[in-house]
Amino acid sequence: MTDTTPATAVLGLGLFYGGIAQLIAGIWEFVQANTFGALAFVSYGAFWLACWWTITNPEILKEAGERGWAHSSCSGLCSRPL
C-alpha cells in the first residue's frame, strides 16, 4: 500500500506533528507539577505517534493479523474515562 496522494501526506504530517506537540505539552505539564495533564497529553501524543507509525508502515498490521484491532480498541477503552 503505497498511496502517495496529498491527503495521505497531510494525514501523516498531522498525526506525527500532533503527536509530537502533545508529547511536548505533556512534558510541560509534568514540569508544572500537573500529573493528570502530563498523563493525558503524553498518552494521547503516544497514541497519535503510534497511529502515524501504523499508517506509514502497513506491514505491521499484516504481521499482527487479527490482533491489529487491539490498538484502536485499547485506545478507545483507555480514553473513555477521560
Image (cartoon, grey):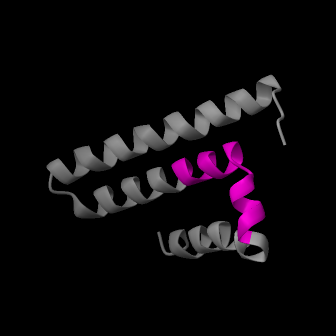
Give the magenta-colored segment's residue range: 48-64
In this view, the residue in front, 50 or 21, is 50
For residue 58, above or below residue 70? above
Tell whether position 11 is magenta: no
Please provide percent x and percent y for residue 24: 33, 41
Please provide percent x and percent y for residue 77: 58, 76
Give the side of residue 41 with respect to residue 56, left or right.
left
Task: State the predominant SS element of the stretch in magenta.
Answer: helix
Q: Residue drawn 83% across and 26% down?
A: 5
Please provide percent x and percent y for residue 63: 73, 65
Q: Residue drawn 65% across and 35% down?
A: 12
For residue 42, above or below residue 6? below
For residue 78, above or below residue 10? below
Q: Which quadrant of the structure image shows residue 33? A: bottom left
Tell whether position 62 is magenta: yes
- Quarter holding the N terminus is top right
Give the side of residue 76 with respect to residue 34, left or right.
right
Q: Which quadrant of the structure image shows residue 65? A: bottom right
